Image (cartoon, rainbow, N blue to C red):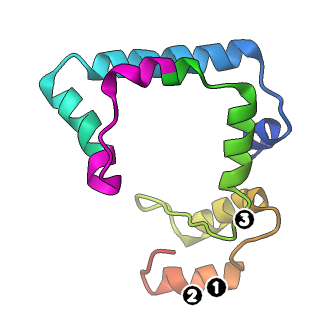
Amino acid sequence: MVTELRGIFNGNLTREEIDAAKQYRLGRYQRGAQTVAGIAGSYAGRYFFDGVIDDYYRIPERIKAVTKDNIIAIANSMFTQNIWGFGVLGNCGKDFTLQLQDQIAPLWKGQFIPTTQLKGALSHGRAI
């Protein structure tokens, strides 16, 4: 994951990868539009959180409009803030969780929660 994201940060995306991602997203959109529940769910997501009703028929053109520069800018913006969290689901143990946390921490360009602080939170059953 870290290697792939660093590649995106540095612009290492091929036209084929971008086209494949767009096709995948367009297919998911089309499958989601096959039922009333799927359409309602699509509308509800943005409306529930933002009060926005998306123009459902413009989604395909929005997918097609995504560019390499968009992807790089968004990926970089996600990791420039000193705001992040890491969660696990299941019983994988504290040590494994801490190893994973240490592996992804460099994505935030040096901004990460010290392992000692994370251990304290884990021992109290709190999420970070």
Give the amino acid type for the residue marked by disc 1 in the picture.
Gln
Cβ atoms under marks 3 and 2 closer than 8 Å: no
Real-space CA distance between mark 2 and mark 1, rounded to the nearest whole angstrom: 5 Å
- Tag 2 residue: 120
**In this rendering, would 93 be left or right of 105?**
left
Q: Residues within 10 Å of mark 2 (few under 14, many from 20)?
A: few
Residue 4: x %, y % from top left: 74, 37
29 within the magenta span = no
Q: Residues within 10 Å of mark 1 (few under 14, many from 20)?
A: few
Q: Tell me, for residue 29, which label it has, or none.
A: none
Name the main secondary structure of what is drawn in magenta. helix
Give the amino acid type for the residue marked by disc 3 in the picture.
Asp
Real-space CA distance between mark 3 and mark 1, rounded to the nearest whole angstrom: 12 Å
Residue 18: x %, y % from top left: 66, 20
**In this rendering, would 33 be left or right of 124?**
left
**Which residue is farthest right?**
10
- Tag 3 residue: 102
Q: Is residue 80 above or below residue 36?
A: below
Q: Tell me, for residue 117, which label it has, or none.
A: 1
Residue 99: x %, y % from top left: 68, 63
Residue 36: x %, y % from top left: 13, 25
Q: Nearer the viewer, residue 65 or 33?
A: 65
